[in-house]
Image (tube, grey):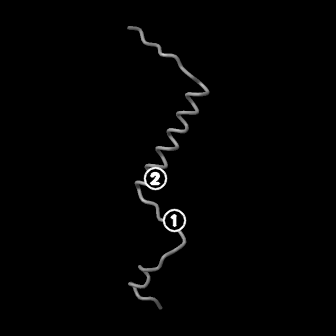
Amino acid sequence: MLTEKELNEINGGALKLSAGTFLIIGGVISFVIGFVNGYLRPLTCSSTK
C-alpha cells in the first residue's frame, strides 16, 4: 500500500501544460485561421465617410 505522500508524488505520462501554454496555442490557431480566411475571402473596406 502506498502512503498519501507517495500517491501525490507519482508522475504519470500526461503532458503538463499550463494555462499560458493553452493561451499561446489558441492565439496561434486564431491567427492562422484569420490569415487563411483573409487570404481566401478578402473583403474590401466599406466605409461611408
The percent coordinates of residue 9 (x first, y second) are: 42, 80
Q: Which numbered tag is attached to residue 15? A: 1
Q: Which corner quadrant of the image does residue 43 belong to?
A: top right
Q: Give whichever of 5, 34 is nearer the camera.
A: 34
The percent coordinates of residue 19 (x first, y second) are: 41, 56
- Going 46% across and 44% down the picture, which residue do you hit? 27
Is 4 rendered above or below residue 39? below
Number of marks: 2
Q: Which numbered tag is attached to residue 22? A: 2
Q: CB atoms at circles 1 and 2 under 8 Å apart?
A: no
- Going 52% across and 16% down the picture, which residue do you hit? 44
Residue with the most extreme bottom position: 1
Is 11 rendered above or below residue 44? below
Is 9 rendered above or below residue 42? below
Earlier residue among tags 1 and 2:
1
For the residues marked 1 and 2, what is the alpha-carbon distance in whole angstroms?
Answer: 12 Å
Instruction: Report the amino acid beneath label 1.
Output: Leu
Instruction: Report the amino acid beneath label 2.
Output: Phe
Q: Indicate left or right for 17 with 13 as reference.
A: left
Q: Which corner quadrant of the image does residue 49 belong to?
A: top left
The percent coordinates of residue 14 (x first, y second) are: 53, 68
Q: Which numbered tag is attached to residue 24? A: none
Classify 10 Å Cα crowding around label 1: few (below 14), some (14-19), many (20 and above): few
Mark 2 lies on a secondary structure that is helix
Mark 1 lies on a secondary structure that is loop
Q: Indicate left or right for 45 with 37 as reference.
A: left
